[in-house]
Amino acid sequence: MLAALPATMHAAERGGTAHLSSKSFAPAPNGAQGLCSRYAWACARGHSAALNPGEVRLAEQINRRINASVRPIEDIKQYQREEFWTLPTARGGDCEDIALLKKAELIRQGLPPSRLLLATVLDRKRNNHAVLVLRTDKGDFVLDNLTDRMLHWSRTGYSFLKVQDPRAPHRWTAVLAGGIFKG
């Protein structure tokens, strides 16, 4: 995968950027309040050492494995509330629960927390959605429960709304890039 990453850099040449850039601080997404106190690792800083090809392959494997193993279920059915960011249960989880599980597993496997950022987006149908962003030296790549392929953020077709601040992951920043924000 890492060898293939430079090909995605063409997105930057077409007016996009390799990494999502923050516009300003923003409030945490609905349902994410209390996330850092429930799961300290979800907001851990850690070091930001460069990723090696094995770590990128590991991220791809974990993305596929978790996508195949977690049954989709909406928060309203599971918790009787619209949004609640938590790890999946035996019943399953929704997009943000799956993104959290991927982040937890990748941190457990030794990837730097500052390279793993939760993000909110509008998907291609303009539905609210959450993904995990893997920040590499070649750009930001998306681990998504809707696809097993890790794509450069600019190739997802998503409208990126907010992302965790890599310098202080307990804070969120507005991104407003891609999708409906193009042009």
Image (cartoon, rainbow, N blue to C red):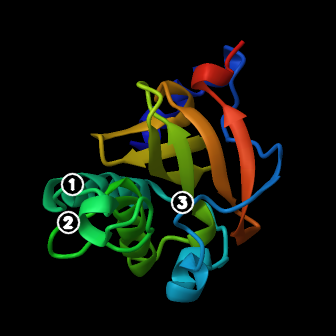
The location of residue 153, given as percent across then percent down, is 54, 35
Circle 3 Cα neighbour tier, 10 Å, few/some/many (<14 / 14–19 / ≥20): some
Secondary structure of residue under mark 3: loop
The Cα–Cα distance between marks 2 and 3, rounded to whole angstroms, is 30 Å
- Which residue is disc 3 drawn over? 51
Of the 4 image quadrants, the one containing the C terminus is top right
- Which residue is disc 2 drawn over? 92
Q: Vertically, is 48 above or below 134?
A: below
The location of residue 48, given as percent across then percent down, is 66, 68
Circle 1 Cα neighbour tier, 10 Å, few/some/many (<14 / 14–19 / ≥20): some
Contact, CB < 8 Å: mark 2 with mark 1? yes
Q: Residue at x 29, y 41 (%)?
A: 146
Which one is earlier in the sequence, the residue at label 2 or at label 3?
Answer: 3
Nearer the observer, 168 or 80? 80
The Cα–Cα distance between marks 3 and 1, rounded to whole angstroms, is 30 Å
- Camera-nearest label, 3 or 1: 1
Q: For the residue marked with disc 1, what is the amino acid?
A: Pro
The Cα–Cα distance between marks 2 and 1, rounded to whole angstroms, is 6 Å
Judge left or right: residue 78 versus residue 38: left
Residue at the far front: name it. 80
Q: Vertically, is 86 above or below 54?
A: below
Q: Is residue 137 visible?
A: no
